[in-house]
Image: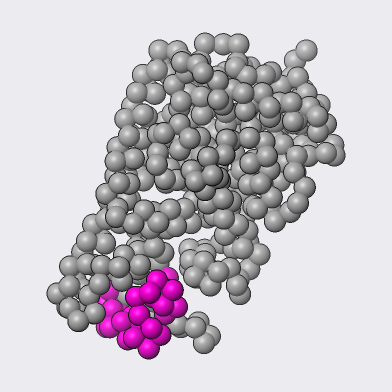
Amino acid sequence: MPFDPHQPYNDLPLLPPPVELETKPVLKKAISANKALAELKGAGELIPDQTQLIQSIGLQEAKLSSEIENIVTTNDELYRAFADDGQRTNPHTKEVLRYKDALWHGFMAIRQENRPMTTRLFEELFQIIKETSPGVRQTPGTKLANPMGEVVYTPPEGESIIRDKLANLEKFLYAEDDLDPLVKLAVIHYQFEAIHPFTDGNGRTGRIINILFLIEAGLLDIPVLYLSRHIIEHKGDYYAGLRHVTGTNAWEPWILYMLHAIEQTAQVTRERILAIRDALNESLERVRCDLPKIYSKDLVELLFRQPYCKIRFLEAAGIAQRKTASHYLQELARIGLLSSVKAGREVYYLNNALLKILSS
């Protein structure tokens, strides 16, 4: 029977798809995408404290991935809220910060705890993003509509059906086959979005699964490749690609779209990392020359973990006690390396160079 967008797609085919996935155009594009990803991985190793990349770039991904779902915050609100541990901020910004927490949770699960990527881990990501306890959908009624309100897709219904399809996804994820990992990623991403296992947050959960898969496959060491900006800039093509796989089994255009997204995003992210490295080195030299009495490599590197810095960050890092930490930040502001911003009783010190790179 033809696909009916108004009926639950319980007949969603299991993986692997019964078509040739690695066509000549796909294999050609996979080569350039893998090359760009390898160059990104190498660039990440140039930053001495990779926590800087995970936090600063990860926050931008949290913002953009949430923006796709119409959860919008500003860079200023986001970074200030992060500096304040999520206190005194609006609900949208808190939800963006939870995306960051979910990403970190997933990264730690597969990297430090050696956990496999399973339905249980997917549920945990969703629960952190949405700050909820339920997992896989148990009630009917979920439908996806376009901006005009027309239903374009109804995902599978019934918890057992959804869990069976997720189990098949897990099996495909770890199958010992000869598929290029990036081709497999494109298939996994489509299938997860088509299963649509949760009541909300499926897009964000799926985009976290993308990055975790790249780390699991050994293609990246840390979570720094995020496709959300590319999806925002090519949103129509993204959703059209998903629909065409569902409606006409058009896998090749979808896989090519994802490979192009990976290649372009890897190149942009590599440039951003190199810019952060250069800004860090320039700041180290500036402080060494202009403020030799307070110069500390740890101090300058701390300023690049996130754009907003506070006195307590220096205290927590063991760099200085409160009075001395305040003096350090004031001196850094005096020479123009930071700018002080007061909000209520709180004083923040903004790393303008870092914020400019992250916002570009």
Q: Residue 194, image x and y in percent?
A: 67, 30
Residue 156 appears in view:
no
Left or right: residue 69 versus residue 8 is left
Q: Which residues are magenta?
A: 308-337
Up-down relation of residue 156 to residue 99 (above or below): above
Of the 4 image quadrants, the one containing the C terminus is bottom left
Residue at the image position 60 percent from the left and 45 percent from the top: 204
Q: Residue 237, image x and y in percent?
A: 53, 32
The secondary structure making up most of the magenta span is helix
Up-down relation of residue 184 to residue 80 (above or below): above
Q: Is residue 285 magenta?
A: no
Q: Residue 304, image x and y in percent?
A: 35, 64
Up-down relation of residue 243 to residue 234 (above or below): above
Left or right: residue 235 versus residue 121 is left
Q: Nearer the viewer, residue 316 or 261?
A: 316
Q: Quadrant of residue 155?
A: top right
